[in-house]
Image: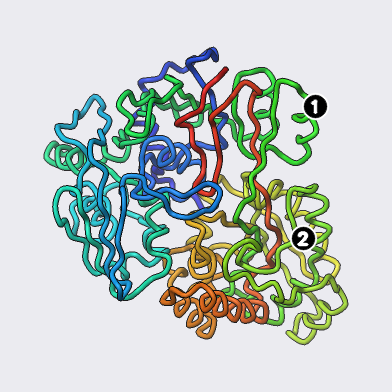
């Protein structure tokens, strides 16, 4: 799978690693918080990143967006936009921007003005317009922007004046407002971009980011450490901790060990088997957050034997999901049956699920002409997630279940960047994956993960395009009435059940752990918030 070319992460390292001594270490004190991150970021520009660790290291530390989300209600609230209006036909959104917001600076650039409408226009058009001078910088892959359909939905974006921006849509879209709280919607500095373009170094905008967020990038060494300094002019209040350090620690056991020895004060995604260890240590605290997510196995429906719906149905019957959730999630998740999480608008509570029935699986495989079985590859994620806390174990249990009905699955895994890239290109037979809500809207699951247009963008890992399903979810986007949207999504889930492009495995809670003296740090629908975190 490896092309031998430099990845975005490698280019990032070349740009920044020389600034950080190889033996650098930082003792935790009340002015410093160390976060044990799961992986190095693909990029410090969230417009061109696609992984959770990249978003935490970039959009959730360095940038802001037009809106944020209420952590309890998951509804849009003001951020860089103080307010907004929507036209009666649902096709024109006008945002009133916050005044007095300062951009950060770095060794290449010091801003001469505050945040204004030009920055919003730049941040949108870079992603939307193929002719924009920045569109192809850093390989120009705007996966999320395209996944949610903004490339086609936005007809025009206009600067009304310095503090008003107007979006004109090709059609009404019930999810549009929520999209502007997503990571890819982070607002970059147009002035910085102009200066770097004139200097012939436009890639600095992505490798040496400048945003309006609570922290400023200071130093980075790939696969080792990221250092940030508090933004002294943060518009949303003083940042209490001067130094924030990400210690790149992919191994879940090592992360816990560092938390126990105070080498880290915050860790994401502890394994369920570690929960009791954390709970029994007076110096540590385990936190949980109800999440909007789904873990699943995607069949590549463009490849044999998974182009046959009977095979996909058979392997749904062959997989003991209850046993998997009991063994792996250990109380931190529940069995899933739908691409939409249970606590989200549009979830079909009456949807059927596939029972564990190996004999029925064998009968369907025989009907499909595979009575002698088949051999396939099963991709296993190299990272832990709330929707999949132990991918290797889940893959092994699925492998064992499928072997009982004559399907031999060879388990393979790759470095996370390669895994994502290969899956987007459709190189897998079947792959374990999952999704955590970016904006609290069902469209973020139903269309982004299974819509026909999402095959091209790569987020439809099943590479499944069903006209009936697709028509229903597209119609749901045009409908602002919640009850009608729910009805349409309910019908789409019936098609999903019949066509079985996935094995929907589990819905998991989000867990993280901290030293007990950490306050102010929080995790919500939109990810991690370090802006109020401090050590007491």
Q: Tell me the SS state at disc 2.
A: helix
Q: Residues within 10 Å of mark 2 (few under 14, many from 20)?
A: many
Going by the picture, which residue comes out furthest to the left? 198
Q: Quadrant of residue 270?
A: top right
311 vs 404, left or right, is: left
Residue sitting at x 60%, y 66%: 340
Residue sitting at x 20%, y 53%: 164
Q: Tell me the SS state at disc 1.
A: loop
Residue designated by label 2: 398
Q: Quadrant of residue 341?
A: bottom right
Q: Quadrant of residue 303?
A: bottom right
Viewer-closest of 144 and 220: 144
How far apart marks 1 and 2 lie (CA) works out to: 33 Å
Q: Measured along the vertical axis of the image, is residue 229 above or below residue 155?
A: above
Q: Measured along the vertical axis of the image, is residue 100 above or below residue 125?
A: above
Q: Position of residue 367 (x, y in %)?
A: 77, 87
Viewer-closest of 274 and 486: 486
Q: Measured along the vertical axis of the image, is residue 484 above or below residue 534?
A: below
Residue designated by label 1: 280
Viewer-nearest of discs 1 and 2? 1
Q: Position of residue 182 (x, y in %)?
A: 42, 52
Q: Are marks 1 and 2 in contact (CB under 8 Å)?
A: no
């Amino acid at each position: 799978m490896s092309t031998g070319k430099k990845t975005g992460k490698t280019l990032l390292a070349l740009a920044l690693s020389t600034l950080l001594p190889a033996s650098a270490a930082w003792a935790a004190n009340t002015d410093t918080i160390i976060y044990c991150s799961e992986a190095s970021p693909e990029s410090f520009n969230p417009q061109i990143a696609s992984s959770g660790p990249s978003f935490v290291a970039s959009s959730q530390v360095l940038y802001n967006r037009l809106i944020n989300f209420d952590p309890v209600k998951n509804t849009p609230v003001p951020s860089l936009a103080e307010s907004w209006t929507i036209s009666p036909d649902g096709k024109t959104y006008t945002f009133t921007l916050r005044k007095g917001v300062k951009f950060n600076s770095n060794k290449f650039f010091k801003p001469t003005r505050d945040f204004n409408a030009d920055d919003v226009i730049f941040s949108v058009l870079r992603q939307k317009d193929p002719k924009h001078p920045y569109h192809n910088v850093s390989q120009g892959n705007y996966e999320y922007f395209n996944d949610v359909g903004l490339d086609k939905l936005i007809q025009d974006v206009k600067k009304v004046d310095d503090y008003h921006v107007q979006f004109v849509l090709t059609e009404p879209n019930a999810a549009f407002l929520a999209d502007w709280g997503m990571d890819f919607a982070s607002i970059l500095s147009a002035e910085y971009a102009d200066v770097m373009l004139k200097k012939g170094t436009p890639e600095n905008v992505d490798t040496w980011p400048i945003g309006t967020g609570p922290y400023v990038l200071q130093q980075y060494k790939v696969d080792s450490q990221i250092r940030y300094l508090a933004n002294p002019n943060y518009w949303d209040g003083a940042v209490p901790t001067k130094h924030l350090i990400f210690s790149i620690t992919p191994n879940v056991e090592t992360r816990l060990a560092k938390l126990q020895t105070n080498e880290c004060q915050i860790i994401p995604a502890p394994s369920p088997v570690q929960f009791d260890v954390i709970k029994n240590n007076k110096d540590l605290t385990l936190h949980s957050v109800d999440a909007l997510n789904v873990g699943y196995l995607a069949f590549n429906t463009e490849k044999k034997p998974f182009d046959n719906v009977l095979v996909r149905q058979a392997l749904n019957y062959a997989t003991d999901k209850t046993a998997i959730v009991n063994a792996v999630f250990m109380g931190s998740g529940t069995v899933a049956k739908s691409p939409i999480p249970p606590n989200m608008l549009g979830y079909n509570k009456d949807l059927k699920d596939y029972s564990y029935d190996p004999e029925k699986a064998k009968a369907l495989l025989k009907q499909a002409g595979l009575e002698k079985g088949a051999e396939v590859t099963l991709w296993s994620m190299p990272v832990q997630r709330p929707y999949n806390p132990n991918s290797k174990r889940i893959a092994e249990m699925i492998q064992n279940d499928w072997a009982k009905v004559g399907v031999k699955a060879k388990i393979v895994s790759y470095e996370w960047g390669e895994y994502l890239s290969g899956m987007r290109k459709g190189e897998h037979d079947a792959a374990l994956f999952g999704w955590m809500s970016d904006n609290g809207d069902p469209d973020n699951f139903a269309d982004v993960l299974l819509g026909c247009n999402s095959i091209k963008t790569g987020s439809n890992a099943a590479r499944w395009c069903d006209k009936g399903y697709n028509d229903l979810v597209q119609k749901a986007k045009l409908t602002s009435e919640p009850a009608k949207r729910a009805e349409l999504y309910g019908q789409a889930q019936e098609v999903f059940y019949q066509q079985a492009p996935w094995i929907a495995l589990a819905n998991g809670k989000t867990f993280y752990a901290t030293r007990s003296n950490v306050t102010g740090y929080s995790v919500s629908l939109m990810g991690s918030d370090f802006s109020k975190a401090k050590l007491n």
